[in-house]
Image: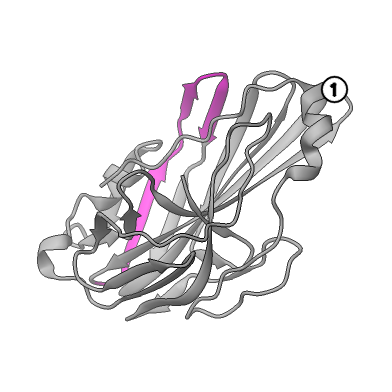
């Protein structure tokens, strides 16, 4: 599967951030079978225990525009095909800018014992108990972009700024599992991501893992990441 993206800060000055701050995305257009959705005004956490079926209907999708000082999220209105769809069974369509998907129990060949260690490569000593538990993460990509559920907020305070990026990832496990790992420091392109020790208790079936990276800086920034078994009603599905 595709390695999850390291959160990188756009290379902009504080003055530029002030000028374009009004363009930062807000609001929520997601609807899911786990409950919640609708209305603007930020993110609200809901239970990450989804159950046997992961399903969404007519959810608005956005694109990522990095041509300005701060990334923007224009509404996507096109129709395209997913060239990567994991798990391989189930259905996922993107028509007139709206996402509809339905995934039940994945086929045995899509489930692996290494899904968590691969996905959580920004952590040390990732372990799953029981060790024979198998999992698969939802992954959808077109020929040119990956589809992610996320949101970013940027706040200016004097000469510094605060960045908060939220993500939700969906994972199927074939039995109740406990996933643990140790945090570590990851550095790339002017950003430092400090992950924390974690314990995730996941139920058999589909689960949502909520990750939030946040920190304050001037030119370089240190982001702390935390995780929990939650979904969020305040994030966008973004093609990037």
- Residue at screen point 64% across, 43% down: 72
The percent position of residue 89, horizontal first and vertical second, equals 19, 71
Name the magenta segment's main secondary structure. strand
Label 1: how many residues lie within 10 Å, few (<14), some (14-19) or many (20+)?
Answer: few
The image quadrant of residue 3 is top left
Left or right: residue 198 compared with residue 91: right
Foreground of the two, 137 or 61: 61
Residue 76, above or below 177: above
192 magenta-colored: yes
Left or right: residue 97 compared with residue 220: left
The image quadrant of residue 132 is bottom left
The percent position of residue 203, horizontal first and vertical second, equals 36, 73
Foreground of the two, 181 or 57: 57
Residue ID for mark 1? 159
56 magenta-colored: no
- The magenta region covers 175-194
Q: Secondary structure at mark 1?
A: loop
């Amino acid at each position: 599967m595709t390695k999850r993206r390291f959160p990188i800060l756009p290379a902009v000055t504080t003055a530029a951030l002030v000028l374009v701050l009004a363009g930062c995305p807000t609001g929520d257009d997601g609807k899911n079978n786990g409950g919640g959705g609708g209305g603007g005004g930020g993110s609200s956490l809901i239970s990450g225990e989804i159950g046997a079926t992961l399903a969404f209907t007519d959810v608005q999708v956005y694109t990522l525009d990095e041509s300005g000082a701060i990334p923007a999220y224009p509404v996507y209105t096109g129709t395209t095909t997913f060239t990567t769809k994991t798990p391989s069974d189930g259905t996922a369509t993107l028509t007139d800018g709206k996402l509809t998907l339905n995934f039940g129990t994945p086929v045995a060949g899509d489930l692996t014992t290494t899904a968590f260690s691969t996905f959580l490569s920004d952590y040390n000593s990732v372990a799953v108990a029981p060790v024979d538990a198998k999992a698969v993460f939802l992954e959808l990509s077109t020929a040119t972009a990956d589809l992610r559920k996320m949101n970013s907020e940027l706040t200016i305070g004097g000469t510094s700024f605060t960045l908060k990026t939220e993500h939700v990832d969906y994972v199927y496990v074939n039995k109740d599992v406990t996933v643990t790992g140790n945090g570590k420091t990851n550095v790339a392109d002017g950003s430092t991501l400090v992950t924390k020790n974690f314990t995730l208790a996941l139920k058999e079936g589909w689960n949502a893992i909520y990750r939030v990276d946040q920190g304050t800086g001037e030119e370089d920034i240190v982001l702390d990441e935390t995780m929990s078994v939650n979904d969020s009603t305040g994030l966008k599905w973004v093609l990037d």
